[in-house]
Image (cartoon, rainbow, N blue to C red):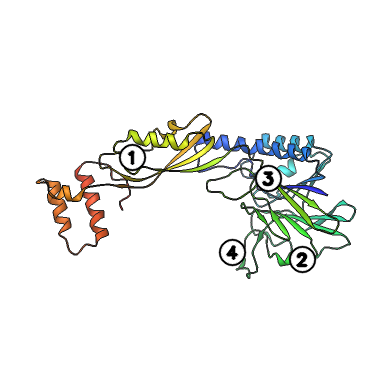
Amino acid sequence: MRLLLFGDLHLDAAFAWATAEVAAERRAALRRTLTRICDLAVEQQVDAVCCSGDLYEQERFTPDTAALLRSEFARISPIKVFLAPGNHDWLGPASIYRQVTWSENVHLFTEPELRPVPLAAGITLWGAGHCAPATTAGFLDGFTATGEGVHLALFHGSEQGELEFEGAEKRPHAPFRASQLRAAGLHHALLGHFHTARHATDHTYPGNPEPLTFGETGERGAVLVTVASDGSIGRQVFAVATSAVHDVAVDLSGIEHSGEIFERVAAALAGLRGTARVTVAGEVGPEVEVSLAGLAEAAPAGLSVVPRLGRVTVRYDFDALAAEKTVRGQFVRSVRAADELSDDQRRRILITGLRALDGRRQDLEVH
């Protein structure tokens, strides 16, 4: 039995960290990834595609998203598609799941309790769905698989380790402990909710297949799960993302004029495609005005940029300034002579005061 598992695609995600244009590009990438997943199912000749929830965003979906899902799943028929709604695509009256007339190869798990579907002789898939956006109880609480053969589970939930659960007001979405899987008679669980992939002995989180934010690490994608007659499994990860998200740090230390900022950003972004968050940081000369304006123009074709100001400090030669017979010089000498100040306080006061005396911007972080 060959199953292709994916989850947490989050079609129509808001991408609040991005500009409107970048957010639209990211949402388009999510749609292309869905198509790639369906193409992969056909290429690998799988028996079924299993979606472990958060397929789309219930609060933001469009009619076009509904049409896309129906079309993509219908075109891979007769491959079965099993859908287990999560907390973001929860099964309510206004859900896409309720509005679409699905092709015959699509099976939707509509109950908040695990229900069985036969996959093949001797192999049963137990699935459940979230019917509310929050406070869904653990699907394994009080559950035991019945019947002979291999039992698999498909649901959206948060594995809590072996720690005791906290109070109900702090309960995560459909919480469970890994030890509950075997105790319930399940051989393996196909799961969604955690965006970092996890390939444990008795459960699999595939992770979000297309980047949703910056800083995501680890191998993720769609997972081809091969199920043997004795319940043992094999796993192969397929990268299905259609774009990349990069976190790029640009060190400004040593620059003497603002034009060098553009040059360093352009050099750091050379060859990249997709979306990049560019964080500029470092120690700059007192004459340098650090601005994020125009940095997006340093990007090569095919790359969208989200600029960010990191820790930028100002470099002053305090000894040289103290020797000046000027207001600045007197200020530096006075601050240096203040014995009640710590070294850190003295530096902060000096930089802030000197920038004020120079008529410079005060929005750079002082360290």
Q: Which mark is residue 170?
A: 4
Instruction: Give how far across and how far down residue 283 sits, in percent.
Output: 32, 46
Q: Is residue 270 left or right of residue 160?
A: left
> Which is more N-terminal, label 3 or label 4?
3
| Residue that mark 2 sits on | 182
At label 1, the amino acid type is Val
Q: Secondary structure at mark 2?
A: helix
Q: CB atoms at circles 4 and 2 under 8 Å apart?
A: no
> Which is more N-terminal, label 1 or label 3?
3
Q: CB atoms at circles 4 and 1 under 8 Å apart?
A: no
> Which is more N-terminal, label 3 or label 2?
3
Q: Secondary structure at mark 1?
A: loop
| Residue that mark 1 sits on | 290
Front residue of 275/111: it is 275
Instruction: Give the crowd class for mark 2: few <14, some 14-19, many >=20 residues within 10 Å.
Output: some
Q: Secondary structure at mark 4?
A: helix
